[in-house]
Image: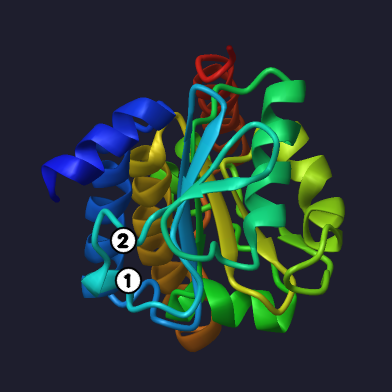
Amino acid sequence: MTDENRKKMQELGISEDVINQVLFVAKRMDDKGLVNSFAGNISAKVDGKIYITPTGQNKGLLTPEKIAVIDENGDRIWGMKETSEIIMHSMAYDICEKNGWDVGGVVHSHSKVLTAFSMAGLDVETEALPEMMGNFHKIPCAPYGAPGTKFIMTMAEPYFADGYRIVLLGNHGSLAVGKNVEDAMNVVEACEAIAEQILITKYILNGESPLDKDEVARFFDIYKENREKRKL
């Protein structure tokens, strides 16, 4: 980045560190096949500004000058044209903040297995995997809402309001939130692996060996304790 651009960023109150965080997550997710040029987007929100990946760009080839920065008034003050899913990201931050959840990063992914579950309209859930139950409870699938419109989040709002960190968007992949953008990425990575394990166990091997009801209830209590720690 040129000194001239750094000076302009300082004048606009733009954080180079936050831009670099978005770039890191975008490249890692591209490397892992969780996003591509036409599907998926990544954002961070710091000091009222949303830093978000641009539309139609390869996530692994982004540069600081390409990351869009949207100010508190909804105006782009830096970078290329933002993804059309800016509405979804902005609403996700607002919903989580309104309901008391500490969220500073949002990741929308079209990873293979989670997207397949969203296309089938199925929740990702199990009573056989402690890591799933204790960390996420389940991954609910919201009804379809048209991409690029507010209706995606209208359908997903009840789940994010209740503290879920990741929700399947009907026929449209997943949306994850986190304390920061790296945290949101970690949620997607973990849940994609879990969804693959559940797909194999429940739908290919034709069944799972569930834990007993008391143990299932214990892990749900652990989930609720973990959820409380994420409040503002």
State the image coordinates of residue 190 (x, y, percent, origin top left): 36, 54
Q: Is residue 175 left or right of residue 30?
A: right
- Give the residue at x 61% y 31%: 217
* Residue corresponding to mark 2: 26
**What distance separates the C-alpha of mark 1 from that of mark 2?**
5 Å
Question: Residue at position x 48%, y 63% from top?
Answer: 41
Image coordinates of residue 164 in percent, x first then y, are 63, 39
Badge 1 or badge 2: first in the primary sequence: 2
Q: Quadrant of residue 98?
A: top right
Q: Which residue is mark 1?
A: 59
Amino acid type assigned to the residue bearing label 1 in the image: Lys
Vertical relation: 216 (above or below) 36: above
Between residues 184 and 136, which one lies in front from this camera angle? 184
Look at the picture and state if 25 lies above or below 37.
above
Amino acid type indicated by mark 2:
Ala
- Image coordinates of residue 215 in percent, x first then y, are 52, 34
Q: Are marks 1 and 2 in contact (CB under 8 Å)?
A: yes
Q: Secondary structure at mark 1?
A: helix
Q: Is residue 82 visible?
A: yes
Residue 211 image offset from top left, x and y in percent: 50, 47
The crowding category of the residue bearing disc 2, from other C-alpha atoms within 10 Å (few below 14, some 14 to 19, many at least 20), is: many
Q: Is residue 46 left or right of residue 89?
A: left
Helix, strand or loop at mark 2: helix
Q: Which quarter of the figure is the C terminus placed in?
A: top right
